Amino acid sequence: MSFKVPRGTQDILPGEVEKWQKVEGVMRHLTNVYRYPEIRTPMFESTELFQRGVGDSTDIVQKEMYTFEDRGGRSMTLRPEGTASISRAYVEHKMFGNPDQPVKVSYLGPMFRYERSQKGRYRQFVQFGVEAIGSKDPAIDAEVIELAMRVYQESGLKHLKLVINSLGDQEVRQAHRQALIDHFAPHIGEFCSDCQKRLEQNPLRILDCKVDAENPLTASAPKLTDYLNEESATYFEQVKMYLDALGIDYVVDPNLVRGLDYYNHTTFEIMSTAEGFGAITTLCGGGRYNGLVEEIGGPESPGIGFAMSIERLLLALEAEEVTLDTEDALDLYIVTMDDAAKLKAVEFASSFRARGISADIDYAGRKMKAQMKAANRLEAKYVMVLGSSELEEQAVNIKNMETGDQEKVPFHDVVNYLLTHKQ
C-alpha cells in the first residue's frame, strides 16, 4: 500500500523549513518589541464557539469546518481561525480583570479549513496573528496595522498595499443592511445560490462574493461609508490620523468587508502588488470586533487583531525574488578511519556540541573519500580526520575547507581552537 500526504496538506522538508523558521523569527522578535506575548490554545474547540464567534452566515462555518463528534457525543471542530479561541480564553480565564488593558497576545499555529486546494492555500495552514482585547482606542488599531506591515517589511517584502475601510457600529450596520437588501432584492435571482441565501442572513457578504464580483449591481451597491454616523466617522478619521502620523500609506476601499461576521469599525487587508504573485493578492486581513467577547459570554471588551498565512508570505517572498538568509553551515565534519577512531569521534562530537559547535560524523561505514564528499555536500567549515596515528599522537589536523589551510591541534585544545576559528 502506498501512502501520500492528505490533499490540501504538505510536508515541509529540511531545506525549506529553515525559511519558515526565519520568518517566524521575525514575527517573534516583533511581538516581543510590541509586547504581544504568545498564547497557545487547543487545536479543537466546541463547534458552537465558532458558530457564535465566527458567524453562521460565513463560508467558514457553512462549508469549510472540520467537525466531528467525540466519544462523549459532543460536537467538536478543528479551529478554522484564531480569534474565537483567544476570545474564549480571554473570558474563561477572566483576563478582562487584568489591571492593564488591552490584553495583547500573539499566536502561531496550524488552522484547518476544508476548501479547494490551490497554490498558497491549504486545508491545513499555518497562521500568525495578534489580538488586542479591552480597548476601543483608535491608536491601538493603528498599532496593530503597523505591526502587520512591519512583519512583511522586515521579512524583505517591498511591494505591499494596505487597504482599509470602516464597517461602522451596530446602528450603521443595520441601516446599511436594509439598504443592501433593497438594492439587491429585485435582481437577486441573477446571483449565485450562496448570495441568494446571504440576502437575508448577511447581505454585506454579497460584496465579498468571488463568484459575483463582476456583477454591475455589486459595483453600484450602497457604500457603507455613506451610512457612517458621526461616532463611526470620527473613529475612522482618528484611525487614519494615526496611520498618517506613523507614515503608513493606505487606500480606502468602501467594498472591503472581510469574510467574518464579527468585524465592525476598522477593517483592513494587506496585499502583494508584486508582478506574478497571482490572482489572489491578499496576504493578511484583520479588523475590529467589538461585541465578539459579549457574544461568547464575556463582558463588554472591544478588540482588534489580524491573521496572516505563513504560506502566502513565503510565496510573496518568492515572487519578489527575496532570498532569506538561512545559512546554517556545519562547523565540523569528523572523518574516521576505523572503529577506534569512530569511538573517539563520538566522544569529540559530544564535547563540541556541548559548547555550541555543530558537528557530524559518518554513520554509513563509508570510505574516507566518500566521507570527504559528504563533508563538502554538507558545506562543513572544517574537517578533521581521525585514524590510528592521530590517536597515538593525541593530535589531529584540522582543515579549513574554504582556504584549504590545515593546522595540527592537540586533542586537549581542539574545542578552544574551533571556538576561536568557527566565527
Image (spheres, rainbow, N blue to C red):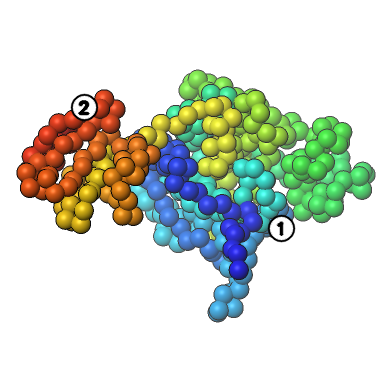
Q: Residue at x 74, y 45 (%)?
A: 205
Give whichever of discs 1 and 2 has the lower sequence position. 1
Specify the quadrant that holds the C terminus.
top left
In the image, is 335 to the left or to the right of 122?
A: left
In the image, is 39 to the left or to the right of 179?
A: left
Res 405 label: 2
Residue 231 lies, with reference to residue 125, above or below; the image says above
Q: CA distance from mark 1 to mark 2?
A: 64 Å
Q: Residues within 10 Å of mark 1 (few under 14, many from 20)?
A: few
In the image, is 222 to the left or to the right of 53?
A: right
Residue 185 lies, with reference to residue 253, above or below; the image says below
Q: Tag 1, which secondary structure?
A: helix
Residue 380 pos. (x, y %): 30, 37
Location of residue 23 (image quadrant): top left
Specify the quadrant that holds the N terminus.
bottom right
> Which of labels 1 and 2 is toward the front?
2
Residue positioned most to the bottom: 72
Amino acid residing under circle 2:
Asp
Residue 97 pos. (x, y %): 39, 54
In this rendering, the count of numbered labels is: 2
Q: Residue at x 24, y 45 (%)?
A: 334
Q: Residue at x 40, y 48 (%)?
A: 38
Residue 263 lies, with reference to residue 150, above or below; the image says below
Let me know if residue 298 appears in the view.
no
Let me know if residue 263 appears in the view.
yes
Residue at which label 1 appears: 63
Residue 375 pos. (x, y %): 32, 40
Amino acid residing under circle 1:
Lys
